[in-house]
Amino acid sequence: MSNTLSLEVPRTSVFTFQSSVHSSHVLCRLDEQRQNDFLCDVTLIVEGRSFRAHRVVLAACSDYFQARVGSHAGQGMVITLPDEVTVKGFEPLLQFAYTAKLLFTKENILEIHSCATILGFHNLDKACFEFLVPKFFDKSKGIQGLRRKACCRQRLAQADFSINLSKDNGEQGCTGTETQLPLMNLRSKEAAFPGSELTSCPPESQSRDSAETDGQMDCAPPGPSRCALLAACGKQGLCLESCDPQMTFPSEALTSEDFCPPCLPCVVENQEEVTGSTSCGITPRISDVCLAGVDVTPGCLPRVTLLPESPSSVAFGATLEMDCSQPCQPTAAGNDCCPAGPFGDLEAAVAAVGVSSALGHNGNKETADISPSSNSALARVVQGKDEPERSIVEREVAEHLAKGFWPDLCPSQAPEPLLLDPAAQAGLEKASDFHWLKQLDLTSSTGDCPFLRDLGGEETRLPDSEPVSQPEKSPYVSSVNSGEDSDCDTEGDSESYTAERAHEVQLPFPVEKISSLSRNDFQQLLKVQPLTREQLDFVHDVRRRSKNRMAAQRCRKRKLDCIHNLECEIDKLNNEKEKLLQEQEELRLSMEQAMRNLSSLCQKVCDEAALPPEQLQALVKCSPLDCITFTSSDGCARDSCSPEGTGTAESSAAPQHLPPSTDPISRTASTPVAETCDPISIINICLDSSSTCVTGDSYTHSTFSSV
DNA sequence: ATGAAATGTCATTTG
DNA sequence: CTCAAATGACATTTC
């Protein structure tokens, strides 16, 4: 089994340590400025070759430079590096300082390591080389240290990518990244390594690790953050963007394997460059097996992105698949259990590669189910196809990191690593494999999980041979807990959760049927398919919620429609009101004009007749158009027309100053009068002509002012 | 950080 | 009485 293992050393791997504070574009810009010698204030001499750089950047990344440039203030500083520092080793480090990416090959990694040590890139040193160097040059450990259960399989990626481990919330101490730039202070808070249950590390292993650690980290094994190092095993660039240093990892879990420090996401790059874009649909499958127990300081969220590093690998057609029939156990379980350490099992990695190879990476949507019990698959796996190991390793690390950074996502795991009773374990096999991933919505918010970000580009499913129909998102995404206490905090994706539950209760028919069938069909289905009590409850619950959901949608739509209709009606009524008011105004103007004409005529008649006041009074009284018509207002007119009436000088202006009448009531009262004979005008004219009676003002006031 | 909108769910009413 | 639909109220998510 082990003799088939071979871990390809990547030709080039890129580790990216990047903080969320300094996003990649900032780093890129910095590096660009460096290359353009923009604002560079220091010249570095290495083996006779000069490099321009910024002191602040160097100081942030390296103890050596911090000491050298810290007290120096002037421009144009020239630093000749020690002879031990070579261009070959230094250049990648310089680039790393600016880009947060460490480009290394098997050939230069030792020199980089050496230079990093000399220059005080200690964090990088700790984070990377303790893991990488053995990975490159000490493969023999891989086999011995394999304690991963054979059930752990993975099927992985076909392209290079980058993994961002960036801390999303600048919490305690992490703010230092602002000045440290890409190079993080990887000192983890070692005390925050609770997940020790899973450790299978022999005491000597731990002690050895500790011993190997320099003073800075002596008391605590490097966490994944610092081990944001990858065992890259592919050809193309593997980019790990690690992040903030304050990430804490379960020390014991990390030290449980020969490759203790590295608990990095692993991603396999496919054997061949994937140029097609069709590969994006491949379904990654991941299980959290062996990831239990990872613990991280809360709030320090790493971000792993699996990004195409090159155009040729843009199509990240990885199929990530990890299966495990059993939950993680403490390594004490020996062969029966998956080691907590992610890199401990190269067998598994290679096995997964084998599976992957056996199944083929055709770049198309392809999901190869490897059931935990699939011995044949395992056999193929073990035969060792050596191609994409790296992705396994990377993937594994990614998982490990991811899990480490969300310890609370899988509350049931780390704390309870022990095997449950068979029934419970069976449940776990089916549904809890992916606990820590379930809450990470890989399809819609993969960014939430740094480690899975771009893995999310593909469909992620729980490893299970039962092809439950789950069209939408991964059923295992964002719905985590299995079991009754699965009242996960984020019930966010209800569909996913439903699908997962359906999976849990082993629903014999697609979930879609529950809500899509008519009542009769549904009942018929229930008759045909005898369900357990749990299944029935689930089915009815799903149906009820589904129906109610649709009802609520209809209800809301109706509400909106109703509101819309009411708004339309309001508009309609407003328009009608406007029309009526307009008509009213037209009628008023028309009436005014008619009254003016009549007044004019009356005035003319009175003038020609030259009647004395008494006669005028008599005329008013005898007029058939008498003020009888103006029931309410004519009294005033008549009074003012009476011989005893007190006249004023304003009467003549009355007809010309009729206030507009807009009151339909007053108008209806006065209109007939005006139309018949307009006695008001007659009276006014008469009184006006006699200059003894003033009626217009009071009359018009009483007649029209009420309008 | 905050509020509005959208959405899902539950409890209850209604037919 | 049961069931489906409707709906108010509430919580959560998204923008």
Image: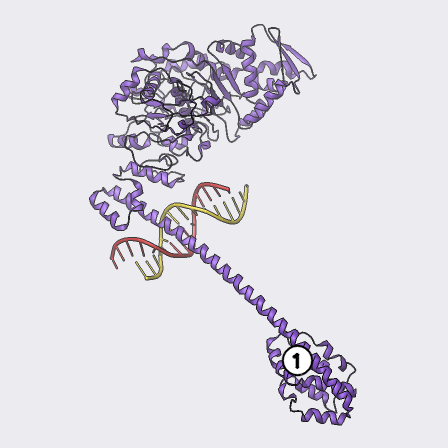
Chain colours: A purple, B yellow, C red
Neighbours of disc 1 within 10 Å: few (<14), some (14-19), many (20+): many
Q: Residue flagged by tag 1: what amino acid is it?
A: Thr
The relative height of residue A291 versus residue A94 in the rendered view (above or below) is below
The relative height of residue A176 versus residue A218 in the rendered view (above or below) is below
Chain for numbered disc 1: A
Image coordinates for residue A466, horizontal then vertical, percent? 27, 32
- Give the quarter of the figure containing the C terminus of chain A: bottom right
Report whether residue A410 is seen: no
Residue linked to disc 1: A703
Q: Is residue A640 left or right of residue A519?
A: right
| Residue at horizontal 67 percent and vertical 13 percent from the top | A77
Report whether residue A653 is seen: yes
Q: Residue A501's quadrant in the figure?
A: top left
Image coordinates for residue A647, horizontal then vertical, percent? 77, 86
Q: Is residue A624 left or right of residue A89?
A: right
Q: Secondary structure at mark 1?
A: helix
